[in-house]
Amino acid sequence: MTSSSSSRPMTQTVHAGATPDPTTGAVIPPIYATSTFIQNAPNVNKGYDYARMDNPTRQAFERAVAELEGGTMGCAFASGMAAISTVLELLPAGSHIVASRDVYGGTYRLFEQVRRLSADLRVTYADPTDLAAIQAATTPTTRMIWLEVMTNPLLQVPDIAALAAFARSRGILTVVDSTFASPWLANPLKDGADVVVHSATKYLGGHSDLIGGVAITRDAAIGERLRMLHIAVGGVAGPFDSFLMLRGVRTLGLRMERHSQNALALATWLESHPKVARVFYPGLPSHPQHALAQKLLPRGAGGVLSLVVKGGEDAARRFVTGTQLFALAVSLGGVESLIEQPSTMTHAVIPTDQREAAGFVPGLVRLAVGIEDIEDLKADLAQALG
Ligand SMILES: *Cc1c(COP(=O)(O)O)cnc(C)c1O
């Protein structure tokens, strides 16, 4: 077993969770495509009995991500939403949640169109950068604060340590969806979060070739309960996707460095472009939480940035359909660059008045910056802006 938890971060991403296969010595954990495991006698086995409970390929990925997050347990899921919905099972029916007001659209849909009906969960949305607003939104039945490490698409950065400390003082769980940061840029458990979730579809997988999710905990009791829910509800990741997710982890550090470098260069350039009214990127000194972002995301601010093009929704539409290298597509976190219009694509599920209240302005465009050569990316955006 390679021990990497004391290594430097880049070494850790390459080695985390690695155990040579005990039967063959394979350096890379094989894809264990099996549903069941033979028993020597009733309930005497080699540590595995049925693959929903545990699968060695899935376990290798779970251990790697838990290690990178500074957690003690990871549960890999078939999608980010499966991870999120299982984390919500930690709550009793009738609970109240306080969530970021520009929460991921899929999470909003799960809150409002599913769990409101099936579990009577009630969610109040508040500005996550305003501690007093979050405090004011809590009620005696609040049991969870739901944060994103960077909000989407406005890239606001909440003070996770302060919010988690407040939540803890009230016996409220703090959950952080850290998809936009990946374990390379932020480790919210170290700031006091109780559960971290990722859509592994994005940076962890890193190549836009899978759907997956993961939830990580540090506290033993919460971890045990989540593991039970993982198995009981059953939205587990399969061995093929687990294999790809672990392969993604191996290059996470290299990719995140390049995503952050490219995004910062584009954000800086776009900010002074005559056709651009505004740029949202936590790595820019003009960002309202820039100082906090530097503390929370010391290795870079990630690959996602948003901008407002002059001329409103029509100009935004022309821009997103005029790029050649940036593909018009939702999602993020792959090596290739993507462009999208939140109001008609990723955030269409959120009612217009709520989008406006959250600060969406006409002309908003989101970029998921890939790892291509920065000069080619710049040239493509320059020609599309005209
Ligand atoms: C994509 C995404 C999700 C959902 O993940 P899936 O893998 O698509 O189910 C959740 N949160 C954030 C921030 C995301 O970007």
Image: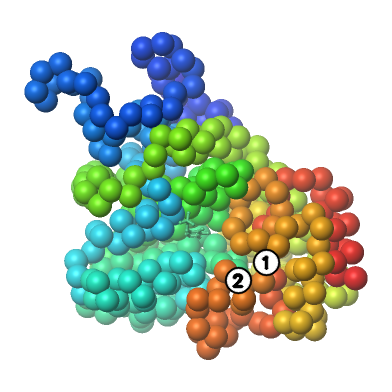
Q: Secondary structure at mark 1?
A: strand
Callout 2 amino acid: Met
Q: Position of residue 105 (x, y in %)?
A: 49, 70
Q: Which residue: 88% across, 63% down?
A: 382
Q: Position of residue 204 (x, y in %)?
A: 53, 44
Closer to us: 187 or 42? 42
Q: Secondary structure at mark 2?
A: loop
Q: Residues within 10 Å of mark 2 (few under 14, many from 20)?
A: few
- Give yes or no for contact between labels 1 and 2 (Cβ–Cβ under 8 Å): yes
CB of residue at label 2: within 8 Å of ligand 1? no
Name which of mark 1 and mark 2 comes first in the sequence.
1
Q: Residue furthest top?
A: 24
Residue linked to disc 1:
340
Q: Is residue 46 left or right of residue 33?
A: left
Between the C-alphas of marks 1 and 2, the distance is 7 Å
For residue 276, what is the image quadrant? bottom right
Q: Position of residue 241 (x, y in %)?
A: 46, 39
Instruction: Locate the N terminus by quadrant.
Output: top left
Residue linked to disc 2:
345
